[in-house]
Image (cartoon, helix red, strand yellow):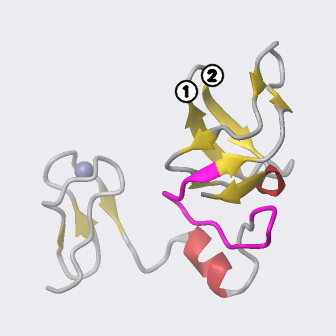
Amino acid sequence: MDDQINCPQCNSENAYNDGSLWNCPDCGHEWNPDTPAAATDVEAGQGVRDANGNPLADGDSVTVIKDLKVKGSSLVVKGGTKVKNIRLVDGADGHNIACKIDGIGAMNLKSEFVKKA
Ligand SMILES: [Zn+2]
């Protein structure tokens, strides 16, 4: 077992592999690390890339490169805002990063407006 994986849901180190799936005894999450859609896309060269063309992955930290208005509100995400622990999503409208921003909350961003921190 040189390949310990932490639970993606609660980050527990107690997750174990039962042969086909990983199980987390702490939160009950089960997952298969071999078939995450995002990772497959990255391997195929179609992954989400930042403004500089660097590939992004779940859990990355990024910096917003320009002021972004938050749809449906008067809030603005300032250029330079650091965003931790992003999650790649299949954003049909181009908003392919799900994240949580301090002072604003959960929102989706376009990868073209961030760069890897
Ligand atoms: Zn867990």
**Residue at the image point whose x is 62% and y is 52% from the top:** 62
Quadrant in which the C terminus appears: bottom right
Q: What amino acid does circle 1 point to?
A: Asp
Mark 1 crowdedness (10 Å alpha carbons): few <14, some 14-19, many ≥20: few
**Residue at the image point whose x is 67% and y is 73% from the top:** 55
Q: Which residues are magenta?
A: 50-62
The local secondary structure at tag 1 comes to loop
Q: Is residue 4 above or below residue 106?
A: below
Left or right: 63 with respect to 25?
right
Q: What amino acid does circle 2 point to?
A: Ile
Q: How many marks?
A: 2
Q: Is residue 23 above or below residue 99?
A: below
Extreme residue in the front direction: 80
Reading the image, the residue beneath label 2 is 104
Residue 48, percent from left and from top: 72, 67
Regarding residue 90, the answer to whether it shows in the image is: no
